[in-house]
Image (cartoon, rainbow, N blue to C red):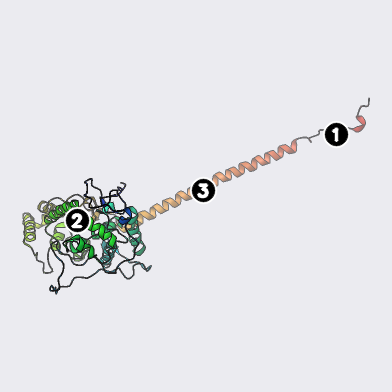
Amino acid sequence: MPRRRARGISMSEKPHSTTIVDTTSQQQPKPHRQSSSELQTQRHSSQATSEATVSAPLSHDIGPSTSGTTDSRKGRGSSRPLSIWGTGQKLYVNFNEMMQPIGPNARKLASQLGYIARDNNKVPLTYVTWSDMPEDVLEDIWKDVQDNTNAPLRYKDICLRSVAKSWKARLKSKHYYAYETDEERLKNIPPRIEPKQWSILVQYWSSEKAKVMAEKNKRNREHQGLLHRTGRTSFAELRRELASKGDNTDRMNVFVKSRQNKSGHALDVETVEVISHMQERLSEVPKSEQTQNFRERVFTSVMGHDGHGRVRTFGISPSQVDVFDRPSKSSRPSQEMLDRIREEIRLEIREEVRNQLREEIRIQLRQEMRNELQAAIQTALQAQEPSSGGQVSDATSVHRP
């Protein structure tokens, strides 16, 4: 399905491909008119600093820090690009059946994708939604990942969704809500953010349309609840760890493990109630009858059906078709079987090629023999024909008048 062309909102009177982009039809109030040159994205300008935009999450009601405020707890700090990125040395990552990164280098790749997402020289901030991002920007992101990793083409969709998740992440809560007025916000440009893009972004976030959308999103987040406690460990990596220990990797067990602390206890009342409800439903049947399908039905009955394009406990990207319509492990051919089938096909192709060559040689020999026979017949016929002048006339026999 072709991507829709991005349309600019009313940062200026006319749409511009490098302005904040919107795909909705609502009208945006126009504080003032700006020239198109003011709205151009400076994607290739030099970075103001090497610090990253995002650190620890902050709430929407936080204000500017004061000199009397201290915090003994330190976050992870600014993210930095991988040292091998761009050097010609590739980062080798393992992927599961659904093309989710797993293994020791999965976190390194995730960190690098986050760094790319927060580099507004590569990924402009002047678009409202990720679906409005120009195709050439997406292709540049994917090429960067391909050049520096062993990522297969099937990973492209998940890769871009991962970048989308980190794009603008916490930027608004940390650097926009931290100040009361746009004047203060424009004076306090976040690190690694292009000033022109920050100005456009602040102007959009201060519009009535953006405020209505933000309030709606806030209400939606309040209904999410039951947040997982896996930190930087992805659901794919959690499943791999559970499988390596011989634990169940169905959605129910992954949900329980991802909501517990290291001691194995849930830390909020709502999560405790949900897990207890699941355990009660399981106890209604003997353990011998608690099949994977039964456990899935219990999980769905307690948690409800998944929303569009989302599958709980699977993280970024896998669709319901990818998760639930996959053939079971027992129904998938083994590697030995695949090798045997591949060898049989190779032999069949070789035999077909050999037979085809035989037929071509046979046809060629027939044609050569036919040509030689025709040439021999022609030569014999020419040898039997009289000379072109017939008998030579005797000069003495010429009648004289």
Which percent across, then down, holds residue 45? 34, 63
Q: Residue at x 55, y 44 (%)?
A: 363
Binning the other alpha carbons within 10 Å of mark 1 as few (below 14), some (14 to 19) or many (20 upward) gives few
Camera-side mark, 1 or 3: 1
Which percent across, then down, holds residue 174? 19, 64
Q: Residue at x 24, y 60 (%)?
A: 166
Instruction: Indicate which disc, 1 or 3, sits on the residue closer to the N terminus.
Output: 3
Q: Quadrant of the C terminus?
A: top right
Observer-nearest residue: 301 or 23?
23
Q: Return the residue at label 1.
A: 392
Instruction: Indicate which disc, 2 or 3, sits on the residue closer to the N terminus.
Output: 2
Q: CA distance from mark 2 to mark 3?
A: 78 Å
Q: Amino acid at mark 3?
A: Arg
Q: Quadrant of residue 270?
A: bottom left
Q: Return the residue at label 2.
A: 206
Which percent across, then down, holds residue 155? 30, 57
Observer-nearest residue: 258 or 108?
108
Secondary structure under tag 3 reads helix
CB-based contact (under 8 Å), mark 1 and mark 2: no
Q: Return the residue at label 3.
A: 358
Camera-side mark, 2 or 3: 2
Q: Amino acid at mark 2?
A: Ser
Secondary structure under tag 1 reads loop
